[in-house]
Structure formats: structure tokens, C-alpha cells
Amino acid sequence: MKSVMKLDLEEAKLLIEEAKKKSEEINVLETIAVVDGGGNLIALERMNGARITGAEIAIAKAFTAAGHKRSTHLFNKEPNGPVLPGNEAFGIQHMLPGKFAVFVGGFPIVVDGEVIGGIGVSGGNGEQDTAVGTAALGALQSHLQPDGHEVIIEADIKA
């Protein structure tokens, strides 16, 4: 039997609060979604004035990052992104319509080498969404570090 870490609401709120803080710092209105290791939504927040489409997009990004254990933008990153025409997973985003995102803004939450969830950020450009997502992961690292846990904090995560 294997012990596993699970995200709970406390950590999801921590991720969202740090994401909002970074969003305000860089002056962008974001929607942030946090899912557990099974892709189930734990928490969602749409900042005042953020696009109404952001909720569904952020959830899809978080779901995809958790489910496929990689940052969502890696799916279409040149030259070997798996969803690019001619590559092995071309069209995979159509398998789960509306739930599978293959563009920037989704990051798996990897603690001690295990994917325990995902965070999706929608509302800014790619650079802004990445800055917000990685800032949130950094806050989780600070929160878990006293207990000896390690969180991957980078844009290009492939676990």
C-alpha cells in the first residue's frame, strides 16, 4: 500500500490567494482553478472584472495539467509538442471536449515527485498566466517546506 498526499481546501485557498496577489501585482484580472489529483475541482475564484469565460477555461487547464502530469503549453510547444499536426497525440483535445486544454496556463501540482493536483489560470497572456501560476506554486512550496516537502516550481513541468 502506498501513502499519498492530497490537496485540501486550505492549500487550494493558499494557491488562489497567492495567484491573486501576483495578478494584482502585474495588473491582470485572472480566474484561478485548483483541482485534486483526480481532476476534481476543489476551489475556483474569478477576480472582479475577469472574463466570464475564464472559469471554464481555468478548470480545463487545471484538469488537463493534473490528468496528463504536464504543463498545458507543452502539448503544442514546437517542435515536438504531442498535439501538433503529425505528432502522436494530434487531436487529443477533442477526446474530452471542453475539458482538455492545450495552451498556456495549466500546471500540475507536483509534491515530492507525485502529481497531487493542478492549477489553471485564465485571463492574461501566456507570460502573465505563467507568472501567476508559478507564483502560486512557490507559495505552496513555502507552506510545505517546513515539513520537508518539495514542490516543483517552474513553467515547464512534465512529471
Image (cartoon, grey):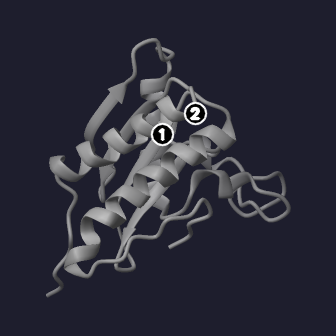
Please tell me in which quadrant of the rendered image residue 150 appears. Answer: bottom left
Is residue 47 visible in the rendered image? The answer is yes
**Mark 1 residue type:** Lys
Which one is nearer the viewer's eye here, 79 or 122? Answer: 122
User: Mark 2 and mark 1 in contact (Cβ < 8 Å)?
Assistant: yes
Give the structural element (helix, strand or loop) at label 1: helix
Q: Position of residue 47 (x, y in %)?
A: 40, 21
Q: Is residue 82 left or right of residue 156?
A: right
Q: Is residue 88 left or right of residue 62?
A: right
Which numbered circle lies on residue 141?
none
Q: Position of residue 59 (x, y in %)?
A: 41, 37
Position of 159 relative to 86 (above/below): below
**Looking at the image, which residue is at 38% across and 23% down?**
46
Which one is nearer the viewer's eye here, 82 or 26? Answer: 26
Question: What residue would you read off at disc 2?
Answer: 26
Question: From mark 1 to mark 2, how far is it between C-alphas?
Answer: 6 Å
Give the structural element (helix, strand or loop) at label 2: loop
Q: Position of residue 88 (x, y in %)?
A: 72, 64
Q: Most extreme residue toward the bottom, as rendered?
A: 1
Crowding near the residue tagged with mark 2, few <14, some 14–19, many ≥20 C-alpha atoms within 10 Å: few
Is residue 98 visible in the rendered image? The answer is no
